Image (cartoon, grey):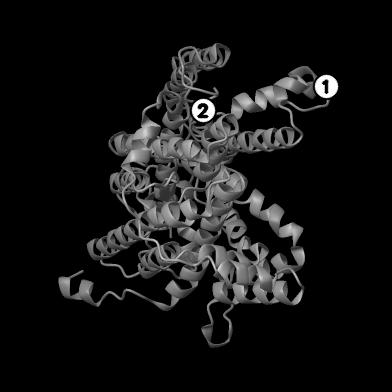
Amino acid sequence: MTTNSVTKLPYWVRGDTNAFFGFGVNVLVNVLTLTGLCIGVIKMPASDVFGVILPALGVALVAGNIYYTFLARRLAAKEGRSDVTAMPYGPSVPHMFIVIFVIMLPIYLTTGNPVQAWTAGIAWAFIIGIIVLIGAFVGPYIRKYTPRAALLGTLAGISITFISMNPAGNMWNYAWIALPVFGLLLIGLLTDVKLPFNFPIGLAALLVGTAIGWIGGAMSVPDVTAAARDIAFAFPHLKFDLLLDGLSDMAPLLATAIPLGVYNFTEAMTNVESAATAGDRYNLRSVLLADGAGAVIGSCLGSPFPPAVYVGHPGWKAAGGRTGYSMATGVVIALLCFFGLFGLLGSIFPTAAIVPILLYIGLLIGAQAFQATPRAHAAAVVAALIPNIASWATGQMDNVLSAAGTTASDVGIGALAGAGVVYDGLKTLGEGAILAGLVLGAIVAFIIDKRFWHAAIFAGSGAVLSFIGLIHAEKVQWNADGQVSLGYLFLTVVCVLFALTRPTPRIPDAAEIELMREEGAEAGVPAPREKEPAVSQ
């Protein structure tokens, strides 16, 4: 593509409107959620949430989304294409809950001081950013040698559990609002049916759900009036004092920051792989550097919520989004943060009219994990899903027990087992779920392909990672869970013994070879040699 043609590449196309309303609503939901968590769970003053945290998050979002728009336009220029879709970027959903319930809430419950909990959250986000920056230099090698089934299966595990299940539960609390919205999204985004005058389906779905909610009495005018009184402009400013206070006692934070930092760059790898599957091959290092920088900048300004590349790129691409929707989302959400409008928006739009977009993304990413990997690797995709399901399930159990004023240890593992609840094993399986899913998925994929040396390497990595607590353990420490490490070590021995028999690796079928050629990437199976016959067209 020439320089002149790059200049003519539009910043906005019709499909960007659909993607903007879909992705913008997605980010809007997440910011509304984290706002409610800060005020409702940590009991932070609304002035700190609306005056410091949200403006800090706004700076990170607008900078990050403009950067990803730049990357998309650069990729379009490099490849001479006009159909490149920018990567979506916003506050990391799993981290949003983890920093509240794992980092900040225990400190608040112990001290009764929300500011002390806040400083710990800021320090934790800063450490996450540093780890992701380091990951920018090792992540590309992990992606290169990891089967696609493991990467996409892990991503599907996140989307099905942490991204989809809570929204789905909220939807069925108000199914009379949510299901019509969900139906409109499915029709508009999964089919070629268009609304009259090509009206954006995302906006139409939000307006229909809001109208149903107001007519049905789910919303309240006094709530809107009260929220409107809190509108005030707040511009971000440096909060080094809070950051340094949090870092003064950083040792306890490392136990979760290290594995979750690894999670961050692993998640970014899977999202880059997802984008590549959809046809847009981004440089992983550029993505990781942006994610790490966003977390560091946000924490310096007072935000404990690390931003990251989102799941869902293929969905926004299918909706017609190109390079403009991401930048527009960042700018609009930032303005809403600066003007403190999220309290008002939360009182206008029913939650049930907003969350169906998250379930749509979960459906799309879950399906992609099976569609864009070799059919022979379906079992590997499921293996990569399982740790995330275990992590979500035990999190739900812990929340229920906490609401009842008790814990699993107080009830007793034996009592839970007697009731048919496999709590202990699921808890171990789900710790470090992203990395654990990647390891398990890779082992299964390589065993299916009879590439036992590769399987042995990943099994050995599982032994090391579990021994130091990065997976299958509550915290990072030496000999974190010896029995799990021993299990992975024995599995390594099994794989080595079979490798010594020198079996012939599984031969990819024609569909797999074509998939590898179309994607131009390693798919976890050997690429065909030149002398192999080409797939007939």
Residue indicated by mark 2: 447
Is 102 in front, or is 326?
102
Position of 489 relative to 194 (above/below) = above
Residue holding disc 1:
418
User: Measured along the vertical axis of the image, is residue 395 above or below residue 225?
Assistant: above
- Looking at this view, is 127 or 138 the one in front? 127
Outermost residue on the right side: it is 419
Q: Amino acid at mark 2?
A: Ile
* Residue 426 appears anywhere in the view: yes
> Residue 233's spot in the image, x, y percent?
41, 66
Q: Which mark is residue 517?
A: none
Q: Nearer the viewer, residue 416 or 388?
A: 416
Please rate how many residues cluster around mark 1, counting C-alpha atoms within 10 Å: few if below 14, some from 14 to 19, many from 20.
Answer: few
Answer left or right for 447 relative to 68: right
Q: Residue at x 50, y 46 (%)?
A: 373
- Position of the N terminus, as image quadrant, is bottom left
Residue 228: image quadrant is bottom right
Q: Amino acid under label 1?
A: Gly
Q: Quadrant of residue 399?
A: top right
